[in-house]
Amino acid sequence: MDPSRVLIFDTTLRDGEQSPGISLNTQEKLEIAQQLARLGVDVIEAGFPITSPGDFEAVEAIARGVEGPVVAGLARTHVADIDAAWNAVRDAERPRIHTFISTSDIHITHQLQTTREDVKGQARAAVAHAKQYLDDVEFSPMDATRADVEFTAEVCQIAIDEGATTVNVPDTVGYTTPQEFASLLERLNALAPGLADVVLSVHCHDDLGLAVANSLAGMEAGARQVECAVNGIGERAGNASLEEIVMLLHTRGEALGGLHTGAVTTEIARTSRLVSRLTGYPVQPNKAVVGRNAFAHESGIHQDGVLKERTTYEIMDARTVGLEANQIVLGKHSGRHALRQALEELGFAVEGQALNAAFKRFKEIADRKKQVTAMDLEALVTDEIREEVAAFSLEWFEVEDSSRRPPHATVGVGLPDGAESVGAFTGDGPVDAIFHAIDAATGFDPRLREFRIDAVTAGQDALGETSIVLELDGVTGAGQALSTDVLEAAGRAYVRALSNAVRRARAQAEEPAGERAADYVPTP
Ligand code: KIV
Ligand code: ZN
């Protein structure tokens, strides 16, 4: 293999999905995985199959349906975890099992409540067990940056002796610094000679804002796989951001001895938007590479410079990351054929029933909005992907609002058995009234944790996109929706969030004690 090629291991659907409030269904995960394949990532970590039937099903669907990248499933060192991971990824073109166990004494003593000897035994047995199923096995010594380096090296060597083909060094709690991390990798290389024969990987968290810098230090110290997530999502402060790693090597590769990736950079912006929409996690405006201001110039001097010569103040061309790419504009007279063609140009192959549904939504929007742009169409298709996973749907609503009286809302909510339930509420504001009217119709009383409205494009008739996170019996559920009417978008997002929360709460209640997802998901 080319010694300067860095493999991009995407963990958006595993570590990223562990972010609070994110609950993607299988269809949404599949859509993201397909887009990751278009982006040209090398490995998709599709999930942690033992944690829940939903996770298993999604990993299996990705393994069966996504061509190109390696599809990995995460597993602790337990036999049941590895069997679940194998059963979920076995139909992939190129399956991988990724198994991990902590090597830091903090984790060994307090979380695993075991001994170093036992950790060595577990690592050995886990890799050996996984190797019975397939060749491509990755091993991670969790919390390596707070662990004794000699012990970590010993565990890594054991994993390599058992046949691990990738060894990943995680900075699980985002604690290390670039120099320290580079020294750690150098020491590991010296102490575990087998590392020279496998792919060395890094997995950095962003608790101190150093995830990308630490990943870079890792690459400079010889790592040729970087684990990262789109928009940097992940546990706590998140993971190294995929788009920053890819564009760092694209822009500065020469200065880094020719390091490069196989990513298709022009797919970056769209991938970022898709992940943001489906997870409900917004991208901060000044976020590197994908923030809406990443290529905006405010100061007069900068604007003047860029107008004369773009490179005066831009180190990357917006088109390289896929911004400003598409000029499609449709209107209310555009037909089904024009819509299908426009969607194809945007990379969506929409046919049959899905095309009919998209066309119906398109007509509703085009009736209220003069010009439907590429960004609108992308938002619309993503909205259609958000399957009504559960139970409820907002059938209709009425809101009376006035500066003289408190607003009053009445809603009709479709229930799982097909019946319709009507609820009404007089609230503090029109949105509050709709949300409580939905509670009245469904009989649930969730707590609203987040509510956001964004405009998809500029202009007074812009589509409004709402995002909601709510909590029901200690379980969070997220929902997003799109409409030219922000009240409608708010109501639909609320119903989706409630459906998700109810589904998750029921799934948790049905899992036998000791087998709950929360018991399985470590806190990496
Ligand atoms: O942060 C971490 O240590 C992880 C491991 C499972 C690789 O996510
Ligand atoms: Zn992690």
Image (cartoon, rainbow, N blue to C red):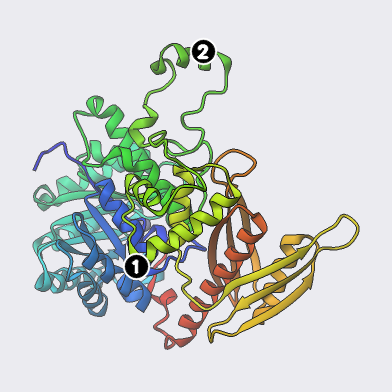
Front-most of residues 174 and 367: 367
| Residue bearing the label numbered 2 | 304
Name the residue located 44 percent from the left edge and 47 percent from the top edge: 273
First along the sequence among labels 1 and 2: 1
Which image quarter is the N terminus in?
Answer: top left
| Quarter of the figure with residue 75 | bottom left
In front of the other: 199 or 143 = 199
Quarter of image, res 25: bottom left
Picture residue at 45% right of the left edge, 68% below the top: 387
Does residue 152 appear in the picture of this structure? yes
Q: Is mark 2 within 8 Å of ligand 2?
A: no
From the viewer's perspective, tell me whether residue 22 is left or right of residue 241.
right
Would residue 106 be seen by someone viewing this image from the given angle? no
Q: Is residue 127 above or below residue 303?
A: below
What is the x, y in percent for residue 509?
49, 85
For badge 2, the amino acid type reads: Asp
Q: Which mark is residue 108?
A: 1
Query: In what element is the residue under mark 1?
Result: helix
1 vs 2, front mark = 2
Is residue 79 shown left or right of residue 516?
left
